[in-house]
Amino acid sequence: MQRDEFLQQLWLDYIHCHPDIGALSLWPPELGAEFCVLVTLNRAPYQAQRLLPALHHFGYRRVGNHAMADRGILANVLSPGNDDAWIILIELQLDTLTHTPRHHLETLIKRAHPQDSRGQNLLTRGRPWPMPDWATYQQLQAAHPLAAWLAIMGPRMHHVGFDCQRSGGGDITTYASIIDEAGLKPGGRADALLPISPLLEHRYYACCTQRTVFAAGDEHRVASGGLALVQKRLPGTRERAAELLLPQHTRCELNA
């Protein structure tokens, strides 16, 4: 698999999960996303250190490592080296959860089929383990929204970000108005997952809720991702918006 195929698979999986986003026609077709936020967890074989070699194979280079202890996550920032989308790979630290929700999530992971736990496309294959029941999902949601999200979605793209300044069709306020009219609602702090640098204007929109079938046949409507708009506050800077996304105070030393 090469990078173009990987990015195409990410996008197709994303709009399959979020058809309301796929239906939006805000940008010219040739304008790609500014960044993709992918989510995984620190358990084999889905931990970031196991996924990074495949991303390196696709030509991505890790240029930043960020820790957000208050959110229980680590984030790896990967540069494409060209105009393609940057990747923000978030890793949920399961050891920050209390015993019961951690046990629920680990039990699901252990039930993943071996064939769904190998290869270069672990981030585009969908949920590799069985669907949890509604009660388990609610317990995970109360413990950490990202734990609940991973339980029903598996390691994959959580949301995509677009740089309004690169679009050439208006500023962030213009696009925000269009998205509001399409029915997407601004998400809260927990929905956006990440703290955002003051160097950027940033707006996160949660996807419309969708009917989801849980184990035992229960059906409930849940939101499972979103869309971000960004715009540099100082448009003359040479850095890409994705490069400035996370606050400097969260940055850590890169491991060799």
Image (cartoon, rainbow, N blue to C red):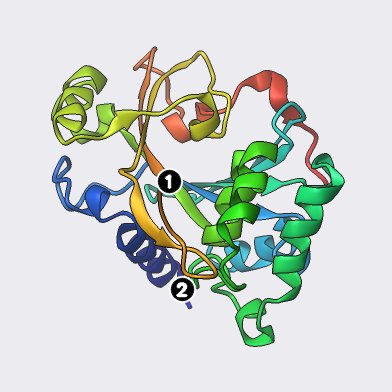
| Secondary structure found at label 2 | loop
Q: Which residue is mark 1?
A: 225
| Secondary structure found at label 1 | loop
Give the label on residue 2, or none.
Answer: 2
Answer few, some or many: residues within 10 Å of disc 2's Cα (few below 14, many 20 plus, some between 14 and 19): few
- Residue at image position (52%, 60%) is 153
Left or right for 215, reference 31? right
Residue 223 location, quadrant: top left
Left or right for 22, reference 118? left
**In the foreground, 32 or 158:** 158
Examine the rendering and report whether any part of residue 256 can be seen: no
**In the foreground, 192 or 8:** 192
Q: Position of residue 225 (x, y in %)?
A: 43, 46
Q: Position of residue 177 (x, y in %)?
A: 17, 23
For badge 2, the amino acid type reads Gln
For badge 1, the amino acid type reads Gly
- Residue at image position (22%, 18%) is 173
Answer few, some or many: residues within 10 Å of disc 1's Cα (few below 14, many 20 plus, some between 14 and 19): many
